[in-house]
Image: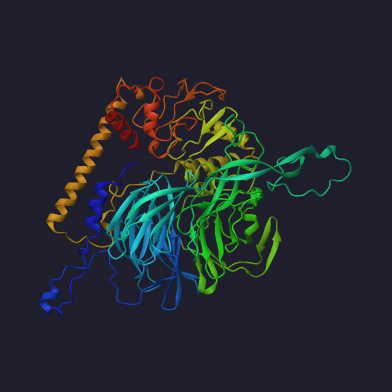
Amino acid sequence: MRAASPTALAFLLLACASTPRDPAPAPAPPPSAPAAAELPPAPPCARRGAGPAPAPLDPTHAGSGVALADLAGRTLAFVADEDDGAIHTVDLDARAAIARTPLAGRPAQVIVLGDGRVVASLRDRGLLEVLEPGDAAAPLARRCLVPVASEPVGLAMTPDRATLLVASRWGHALTSLATADLQRLGELPLARDPSAVVASADGARAFVSHAVGGRISVVTLGPGGAPAGARELSTDGAEWRAQTVLSKKASLPGPLPSAPAPSSGFDPLDDVLSLPRRPSARVERRGSQGFALARAANGAVFAPIALVDPGPETGGGGYGSARVQTVIEHIAVVDANGERADVPPVSRHLGTQGCHLPRAAALEPGEEVLLVACLGLDEVIAYDARAQIPGQPPRVGSVRDRELFRARVGAGPTAIAVDSARRRAVVFSRFDGELTLLPAARDPGPTEIRAPSKQLAGELPVVVLPRASRLDEQRAEGQRLFHAAGGRRIAFDGRACASCHPDGRDDALTWSTPEGPRQTPVLMGRLVGTAPYGWEGDKKDLEGHFARTMSRLGGTGLRADERDAIFAYLRGMERPGEAAASPAPAEERAVPVGPLPPAVQAGAATAAAGEAAARADLAARGDVLFHSAGAGCSSCHLGDELTTDGARHDVRSATRFEAVRAFDTPSLRFVGRSAPYYHDGRYATLLALVEGVDGTMGHTAHLSAEERRALVAYLESL
């Protein structure tokens, strides 16, 4: 894994200069006026206002797209609006948006520090932006920008509010910073796609969910808050699948009997009657969609996930024609010590109406109600967090046993926060740009039964945010369609495009198809100039490939204009930026950067330049090797973008389960962040691939260990 950019460290030292973090000296007499005038200026990131500061309301100190705070008796919501590139300040009591603060990038999450400052993670810039509220009705004052690993997403504080934790998805790292001055305390590489983060109740650990890969990292925090090491817990689970007898409805004499609901929650085919029998088969499922975490008062951590059945190795399963529920909703629970993740077997689930794309979670501590924002369904589901987690042998169960109620919200719910004092939740719906207020209680008030569960009745209060910018109409429609879950237009079982391609990337899974096992490819940055499409390379254009995908998934289909909207949305996606590679322009910086002592500047610059030069030199040597005749890599991966030669090759990789022997040359864009590798995902790392394909896909056996490392460094830089 690649370390954080050393130039980013230098930029951090320049942007967030502070006094040394040594123990405070013994109290001294107050200085005279001349001496006081000679004191160094306050750090740029420090709080400056002397008036009342907002008090954060989240007792678990976890970040979200919405952060709640109390300011002089007013309950404020700070909303990170990624599509608008701004933070909106909303007075929840008045139900009005009162200020908008443009930022230096697109914010993913926001958190209120103990002294009232607000920190936003700018996922497209590799930066944190630190702001300070003053007058509630005025935009936030921008204080400084802090570089971190690429694509910062998740934010959290330790219980003592002394340490800020940042999970960076593209940079696959957890960074810790001192909240007082935003100095970096340490950084730890993690498995790919870390997303949400929350600190343990004792501050000794951090729990990090991963958007793909089915894991939760438990990170040990040292005495100063620096991450010291990590271990991974699996969120893979199992399902007890019932045998069913299928018979044509037309063959049944007389009116149809009232049959019990099938275990999958839906009829696999419209013209058959599914009659369940007792559970008879255990199906192993893979954890996925790990975007959300919520910590309970007892220290347990709830992780809403999707459990995926990619299908059997022999073909024709999860991605192919088998009519089984491929993705089901679930909630993993990690114990307070981070020693195990409880993912009990499930026997019942909600079919197409399950929460296939959980994107945010929050817990109301008083009544222990867990609220989960479900993208695609445009619902928030409330679960009983007191219930004994099912799964102690021989019992089986599911989230269906724990569901309390549901609430309809605006399109694209991606963030949720709880105001426990008023037993209410605040939900941000990104696609519609609005906040919805709903009850966060076990007894929420009037409900009505709408299959498959109870739904809150009546209209909920909504605050529309005054956006200054937004996606164009076609891309906005594509965004909605790409995440549309719960229907059957994309897939017969309610899957969305984002079920396999979260954020237009890949799910790190290998799916069973009629042709054999196939690894999910990245879509972001790989649609243009990479024809033909599909691992078999048998579709010359995107339209043909999309039509086959819809057919495989059993979806009823989309109109041509809807398909084109999805393509426009995907083509507009860009690789997350690096802080050092794209520093904020001078006019975007919150404050002028104060001078550092020359020795500090020189030392930081020398260390950063040395490490950057070493890494660049290694990648440059890999570049030469990649394009050498001896290695032969560039004979198929052509051009500056290393996309494809547009041809199929038999690289002797087909297994006995393969229907075809030759495969399309894939694009290498972002290959360093799309493990596993090969058409069937057989290689876990790039180094394993480089060492395993000699003579079949290029030549690497003659390379030394250092040369192979250089080749990998070059591939990781793409």
Q: Nearer the viewer, residue 694 or 18?
A: 694
Quadrant of the snapshot with the C terminus: top left
The residue depicted at 44 percent of the width and 48 percent of the height is 232
Q: Please tell me whether residue 48 is drawn above or below residue 483 in the rendered image.
A: below
Outermost left residue = 34
Query: Residue 379 sits in which quadrant?
Result: bottom right
Quadrant of the snapshot with the N terminus: top left
Outermost front residue = 393
Numbered marks: total:
0
Outermost right residue = 254
Q: Please tell me whether residue 697 is drawn above or below residue 518 in the rendered image.
A: above
Please say whether residue 428 is visible from this viewpoint: no
Query: Residue 146 sits in which quadrant?
Result: bottom left
The x and y percentages for residue 378 are 58, 55
| 291 relative to 612 in the view: left or right | right
The colour scheme is: rainbow
The residue depicted at 32 percent of the width and 77 percent of the height is 51
Please say whether residue 674 is visible from this viewpoint: yes
The x and y percentages for residue 101 are 38, 63
The x and y percentages for residue 56 are 41, 70
The x and y percentages for residue 598 are 12, 56
Q: Please tell me whether residue 76 is drawn above or below residue 226 in the rendered image.
A: below
Query: Residue 526 sits in which quadrant?
Result: top left
Q: Nearer the viewer, residue 411 or 280?
A: 280
Q: Nearer the viewer, residue 709 or 351?
A: 709
| 673 relative to 93 in the view: left or right | left
The residue depicted at 65 percent of the width and 44 percent of the height is 240
